[in-house]
Image (cartoon, rainbow, N blue to C red):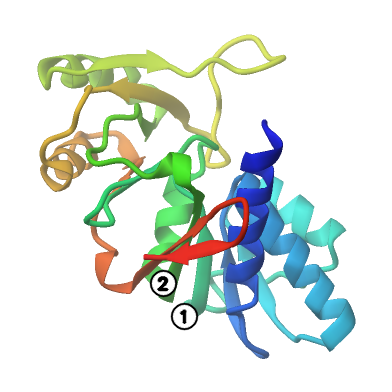
Amino acid sequence: MSGDVVNSKKNAGYYAADLVMDGNIVGLGTGSTVFYSMERLSERIKSEGLCIKGIPTSIQTAIRARSLGIPLTTLDDNPKIDIAIDGADEVDPDFNLIKGRGAAQTRERCVADSAEKFIVVVDAGKLTRKLSAVVPVEVIPFALTHLCEKISDMGGLAAVREGVRKDGPVITDNGCIEVDCDFGDIDDPECLEMKINNIPGVVSCGIFTEFKEKIVVIVGNESGIEIL
C-alpha cells in the first residue's frame, strides 16, 4: 500500500472518529480505514476522557478494539446505535455501496441498519461511476451449490473465496461460506441486491443500497478529506 493511500485512509478515519460524541454507542466496521478511526478513538479516550461503547462487526475488530482500550458492548444490549463508521469496496454517486472484502457484510449491515448515522470512510480510489467490483455473498454451507447455480442463471460468475494460510474456503464469523460473485458493471444495484438476498440460503450480500438517507461519505486524500 503506497504512502499516499495510507495517508488518505488515515485522514478519512481520523475525521470520522472526531464526529463521535461523548456517550455515543459506536458501530465499528471492519477494514483498514476503520482501523484508523479506532486508533483515533483510542487517543480521544486517553486524552479527552471520551466515554463511548463500541459494537464491533467482526472478531478482528473486537480484538483490535480491546487492544486499543475501546470499551465494547453488543447489539443485544444497545439495539440503537448513534453512529456507525465503516469502509466500502466501492461507492457510486448515488451512495450505493459494495462491501464485504473482509467477509463481514452481514454484521456490518445489521449495525448500519441500527445506526442513526452511517459514516462511510474511503480513499478516492473507492469512488466509481458505476459499481462493478465482485459482490461478496455469505451463504450457509448447505446452499453453496444452489447459490452458485443461481448466480450463473443471473449472468454472474461465482467463486468460493479461498482462505489465506488455510486450506479451503473462507468461513465467516457466522460459520458460513463467503462467495465472490462477478457481474461486471451493475446497472441496477438495488434490483441485484434484492435478487441475491432472496436466494434461499443467502445470509447477506455485499451490495448496500438501503441506507442512502443516512450515509455520509468521507473521502480521504493526501492533504485532508472531502465530505460527500
The vertical placement of 135 against 213, above or below, is above
Image quarter for residue 109? bottom left
Q: Where is residue 6 in the image (x, y as percent from the top left)?
A: 68, 43
Q: Quadrant of residue 44?
A: bottom right
Label 2: few (<14), some (14–19) or many (≥20) C-alpha neighbours in 10 Å? some
Residue 49 shown left or right of residue 153 in the figure? right
Q: Quadrant of residue 167?
A: top right
**Of the numbered discs in the image, which one, if any, rests on residue 196?**
none
Question: Total number of numbered labels?
Answer: 2
Query: Are the residues at dot 2 and dot 1 in contact (C-beta closer than 8 Å)?
Result: yes
What is the x, y in percent for residue 127?
Answer: 37, 45
In the image, 56 versus 90, the foreground residue is 90
Residue 33 visible (yes or no): yes
- The residue identified by callout 2 is 114
SS category of the residue bearing label 2: helix
- Of residues 94 and 72, the one nearer the viewer is 94
Locate residue 161, reporting x and y percent: 48, 19
Question: Few, some or many C-alpha atoms within 10 Å of disc 1 (few <14, some 14-19, many ≥20)?
Answer: some
Q: In this view, does 73 lie above or below 142?
A: below
Q: Which amino acid does label 1 sit on?
A: Lys
- For image coordinates 64% across by 71% down, the residue present is 17
Which residue: 34% across, 29% down? 133
- Residue to which mark 1 is pinned: 80
Q: Which of marks 2 and 1 is nearer the N terminus?
A: 1
- Residue 145 makes an appearance in the image: no
State the quadrant of the N terminus: top right
Give the CA distance from mark 2 to mark 1. Answer: 5 Å
Q: In this view, does 2 lie above or below 188?
A: above
Q: Quadrant of the C terminus?
A: bottom left
* 172 sits left or right of 17 in the view: left
Looking at the picture, which amino acid does disc 2 mark?
Answer: Ser
